Amino acid sequence: MGSALIWGASGGIGAALVAHLGSMGWQVYGAARNTARIPRSAQLALDFDADYEHSFEAVAMRVAQETTELDLMVYAVGDVAYAKLNEMGLKGWHATLQSNLTGAYLAALYGLDLLKEGGHLVYIGAYLDHIRLPKMGAYVAAKAGLAELVTVLQKEHRKHRFTVVRPGATATGFWDKVTLKLPPDAKQPNQVAAAIVQHHINGGSGDLDL
């Protein structure tokens, strides 16, 4: 058993992680915009909005009242502005980078002190060659930046583990926001969650390509 904080715990991979870890007897803290959708196995369901820095700080402070010895933290937040770069506008650009990249930085800024030595911070990335498509420019830029952010985090915090998970097509709400067709071989969120947890248990770090 262990303890974990899941950012973005109300849907898709984040909710699947809460449920999977809970079934294993872990103490799980879930943070999400819609706390009603966080699985009931979460020890705490915390209000969280990736658009606001103070939201990250508030979650971290609340979890710190329970523990500063987390084994695992996963940033499973993401959004996409599906439009051509010259049509999405600055608002769509900012929203995509905020959820996928700036939020990833803020999760580290406020969350790393909650991890015990050897603790593991996991981010959900993407296969860039799969998403370099029209109307995906902001999302591509954000996920490319995420990979480089994690590379630097690994060098700056050698007492912790860091992983970028590239799950490939997964049946989440992402597909409701784009006109792309969900591939028939797409993974289910619970499959990705199980792979992440196993990677953690195995002592893994670095890239996890599924």
Image (cartoon, rainbow, N blue to C red):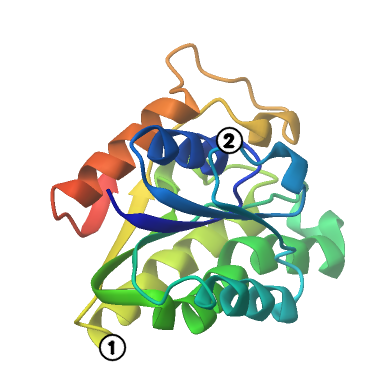
The residue type indicated by label 2 comes to Gly
Q: Residues within 10 Å of mark 2 (few under 14, many from 20)?
A: many
Relative height, residue 171 to residue 166 (above, below):
above
Name the quadrant containing residue 97.
bottom right
Disc on res. 76: none
Residue 93 locus on image (x, y percent) = 75, 64
User: As drawn, which residue projects farthest toward the left?
Assistant: 202
- Residue sitting at the far top: 184
Residue visible at 85% across and 66% down in the picture: 91
User: Foreground residue, 193 or 128?
Assistant: 193
Residue behind mark 2: 12
The residue wearing badge 1 is 156
Q: Position of residue 149 (x, y in %)?
A: 41, 75
The quadrant where residue 182 appears: top right
Tell me, yes or no, if residue 210 can be seen here: no
Residue 121 falls in image quadrant: bottom left
Establish if 143 lies above or below 210.
below
The answer to whether marks 2 and 1 mark residues whose Cβ atoms lie closer than 8 Å is no
Direction from residue 66 to residue 50 in the image, left or right: right
Q: CA distance from mark 2 to mark 1?
A: 30 Å
Q: Residues within 10 Å of mark 1 (few under 14, many from 20)?
A: few
Residue at image point 60% right, 80% down? 61
Direction from residue 30 to residue 169 in the image, left or right: left
Q: Is residue 20 left or right of residue 194?
A: right
In this rendering, is residue 200 above or below 160? above
Q: Secondary structure at mark 1?
A: helix
User: What type is the residue that disc 1 sits on?
Assistant: Glu
Depth check, front residue: 61 or 137:
61
First of labels 2, 1 by sequence position: 2
Residue drawn at 56 percent across, 39 percent down: 15
SS for callout 2 = helix
Residue 30: image location, x then y, percent: 58, 53
